[in-house]
Amino acid sequence: MDIPVIDAHIHVQPWRMVKPEALRLMQGNRPDVARLSEMMYDPAMFLRHLDEERIERVVNINYVSPDIMGFSEEALVYAADYARRCGGRMIAVGSVHPTLTRDPDRAMDGLIAAGFRGIKMHPSHQPCRPNAYREGNRVLETAYRRAEEAGLVLVVHTGTSIFPGARNVHADPIYCDDIAIDFPRLRIVLAHGGRPLWMETALFLARRFPNVTIDLSGIPPGKLLEYFPRLEEFADKMLWGSDWPAPGVRGMRANADRFLELPLSDGARRKILHENAERVFGP
Ligand SMILES: [Zn+2]
């Protein structure tokens, strides 16, 4: 059985911008660092890699985080350009910055014009609660409202991060309960399903709200059923993602193959690997 795979959470990012401590952690002791470093600036090479890995399409996530990761707004210019050069095979997700963006309407205009299909909010790397608009954060209020109007997806990182300086106090998915209520037409993806501390909260939200889904990236695929024992039952609410090339992720295909070994129905596999991502992010 060959199911086409959409990997709904990867990171092709401008590594030259990343702070040295964060870069050390990102690259870990991967044997393929030199090749990856080149691929981060070579879309043709990346497309060949997708072919080799038999991955149909990817959702590529970039976000502004100058203080913790080193990504300035230039990362978004890079991300839009890279995706354009990948044709339809890369769906780009960009971001505003909840406390540094000066003119959120203009920033959203720019993201929409550049072809971004979603925005990422990273509560631990842009340190801010994702529901801070309820206490007057105008950037998030504008970004969510504009994303809802324009049909952009909101991807919120949920769950821990070990990058130096990451603020995990904000990364509990429960804050997204507010967003789903206040922006009912906004499609919200809870990246990483709150792992490893808040899976039950993430699943609660995905069950409660029709427009909330979970991406399974960042969880070792062999452990998915420990994290989400009811994966089969809620297969409609789950998107496949690898978080490649994060430390510990062997590869997009290696992770997908490991997923396919789990005792799930073909219907559930098809939804998770392909159909749900197409529904959320568009064809
Ligand atoms: Zn990620």
Image (cartoon, grey):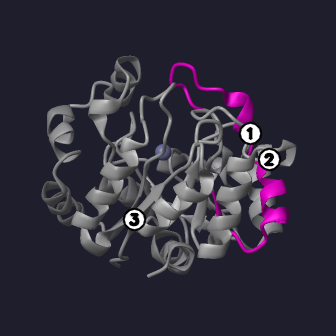
Please give the name of the residue rendered at 17% of the width and 62% of the height, measured from the top-left corner.
52
Which amino acid type corresponds to the residue marked 3 in the rendered image?
Ala
Which secondary structure lies at badge 2? helix
Q: Nearer the viewer, mark 1 or mark 2?
A: 1
Q: Please provide percent x and percent y for residue 133.
A: 79, 48
In magenta, the rendered stretch is 161-189
Q: Which residue is mark 2?
A: 175
Q: Please provide percent x and percent y for residue 86.
A: 24, 66
Q: From mark 3 to mark 1, how far is it between C-alphas?
A: 26 Å
Mark 1, other Cα within 10 Å: few <14 / some 14–19 / many ≥20: many
Q: From mark 2 to mark 3, how far is it between C-alphas?
A: 29 Å
Q: Which residue is mark 3?
A: 114
Q: From mark 1 to mark 2, how far is it between C-alphas?
A: 7 Å
Q: Which residue is mark 1?
A: 129
Q: Relative to 171, is 7 above or below?
A: below
Sequence-wise first label, 3 or 1: 3
